[in-house]
Amino acid sequence: MSVLFTFPGQGAQYPGMLHALPDDAAVRAALAAAADVLGQDPLALDTAGALASTRAVQLCLLIAGVAMARSLAARGALPDMVAGFSIGEYAAAVVAGALDYADAVRLVARRGELMEQAYPAGYGMAAIIGLELAQLEPLLAQVHGAATPVYVANLNAPRQIAIAGSETGLHAVMALALAQGASKAQRLAVSVPSHCPLLEGAAIDMATAFEGVVVRRPSLVYLGSSAARALFDPARIRDSLAANMARRVQWAATARLAWERGARLALEMPPGSVLTRLTAPDFTDGVAVCCDGNRGDSVLALVRRERNGRVP
């Protein structure tokens, strides 16, 4: 049996998320390493005010994911495969040994800046729950246009889909979706139109930021959530990371792929439990659980049990 570590994306953040990490040597080292790269204390990035910035949010997500994974590793809890949602793919790449942590911090800082600069206001994302893709796409077609761009962004579950675009376009589709029977249409805590063609220009600039960065073959199974495939070739991993801001997230297919490859424990790194809720339906004969809100010794016991073939 295999252990999957998952790393959440933007929208999972909350004030104080870095302060809530375990106070151990591995976490302190991860925070210190990030401070060396950024030239500032990363603990200043998780205030409510700071988290209004896409750059700060993405850095906090990267740091939290890597710090927790390293804290678990120091106590003997290691994954067999990793998968990240959007910005979470960078933390997954670090944990898989494909990308150096310092490089990831620099790249993620640049990624957040590029996304903020491309769309400083008037754009974002929303979640539509209760409609399938075939039902939602015609509604987007009714709204989408030069003045009201709106796209499918994240395929989180068969009936949970995120859309991205202009504020006007988002609200128009949300209203249509509710009228067509959606159980919920909710604006997300994301201030940029991620995972759609609106960010293709920023993705090209991101590819430039990768020049000179060493990307290695991962030491464990690295699942790319844009392609919903296991990626081993460094060039493909580099392309996936650079371009993922403009590509759909196929989380439902990625979670299913992890299960098909033998994962029976999906352990979500901080912050939050978004991926746990999305992954659980595919782990019907396994366990999906998050680090947040659970005792460290309980999490460690789950990992040891799964790696030992569920022998008590």
Image (cartoon, rainbow, N blue to C red):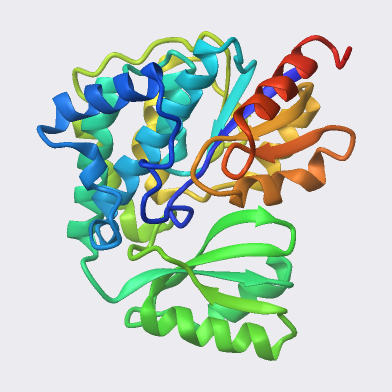
Whole-percent x, y for residue 8 in the image: 51, 43
* Residue drawn at 60 percent across, 49 percent down: 273
For residue 156, side relative to residue 29 (left or right): right
- Quadrant position of residue 289: top right
Q: Nearer the viewer, residue 234 or 19?
A: 19
Q: Nearer the viewer, residue 286 or 235?
A: 286
Examine the image and state in which quarter residue 50 appears. bottom left
Residue 305 placement (x, y as % from top left): 79, 17
At a point 40% along the width and 80% down the height, the residue shown is: 145
Q: Nearer the viewer, residue 238 or 37?
A: 37
Residue 48 at x, y percent in the picture? 30, 61
At 73% across and 15% down in the image, what residue appears? Answer: 304
- 120 sits left or right of 21 in the view: left
> In the displayed structure, would residue 62 be above or below residue 260?
below
* Lateral position of residue 150 relative to residue 222, left or right: left
Please determine whether, in this image, residue 304 is positioned above or below residue 59. above
Quadrant of image for the C terminus: top right
Q: Is residue 240 visible?
A: no
Q: Residue at x 54, y 20 (%)?
A: 72
Can I make out residue 120 in this image? yes
84 versus 164 height, above or below: above
Q: Quadrant of the N terminus?
A: top right
Decide if residue 291 is on the left or right side of residue 310: left
